[in-house]
Image (cartoon, rainbow, N blue to C red):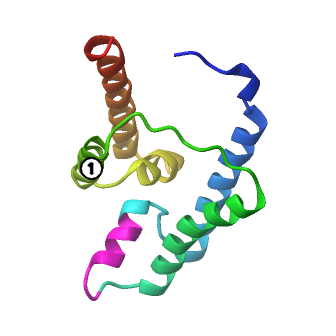
Amino acid sequence: MIVNWTAFTPYAALAGGVLIGLATAVFVLVNGRIAGISGILGGLLRPGGDGIGWRLAFVLGLIGSPLIYALLATVPRPRIDAGWAMLVVAGLLVGVGTRYGSGCTSGHGVCGLSRMSPRSLVATLMFMSTGVATVYVIRHLLFA
């Protein structure tokens, strides 16, 4: 893997991180809830769940924001080196891991760590180390 240093944008990444941190802080202050995507989406999928309005607005914002950005700026076309079957399996594994881990990367990694939750620290260490190990095995051992 080669890093394209000319495309490295530390200030944009920093700004994005600050915006995510501010948004989650405002969300918890206004709603008293954690901005974990799996919990928000899961609440939409449960029949008779509470807070359908704000959950729907949150998910529509997640989907609509990049679409609006794409109208205003040139967005690079993503390159995905996997077929549909691999993407479906990966999505199912993420869903299972989210259920077993009692939350997703945004819930644990962004919101849980900022609240100094020991459970979120363990969960974040586990999904980060599992991701690193998976990339290593796939790129260096299986398809070297």
Relative to 46, 35 lies left or right: right
Please rate how many residues cluster around mark 1, counting C-alpha atoms within 10 Å: few if below 14, some from 14 to 19, many from 20: few
* Residues drawn in magenta: 39-48
Q: In which quarter of the image is residue 142?
A: top left
Residue type at mark 1: give it.
Val
Q: In this view, does 22 lie above or below 83?
A: below
Q: Quadrant of residue 102?
A: bottom left
Residue 6 image position (x, y, % from top left): 76, 23
Task: Report whether residue 32 is seen.
Answer: no
Q: Name the residue under label 1.
A: 88
Residue drawn at x 68%, y 59% as measured from the top left: 70
Q: In which quarter of the image is residue 44?
A: bottom left
Q: Is residue 11 above or below residue 6?
A: below
Q: What element carries label 1?
A: helix
Residue drawn at x 65%, y 43% as measured from the top left: 76
Relative to 39, 33 lies left or right: right
Residue drawn at x 51%, y 38% as measured from the top left: 79
Residue drawn at x 46%, y 77% as measured from the top left: 55
Task: Report whether residue 57 is seen.
Answer: yes
Relative to 87, 20 lies left or right: right
Q: Could you tell me what secondary structure mostly forms the magenta stretch?
A: helix
Residue 31 image position (x, y, % from top left): 54, 76
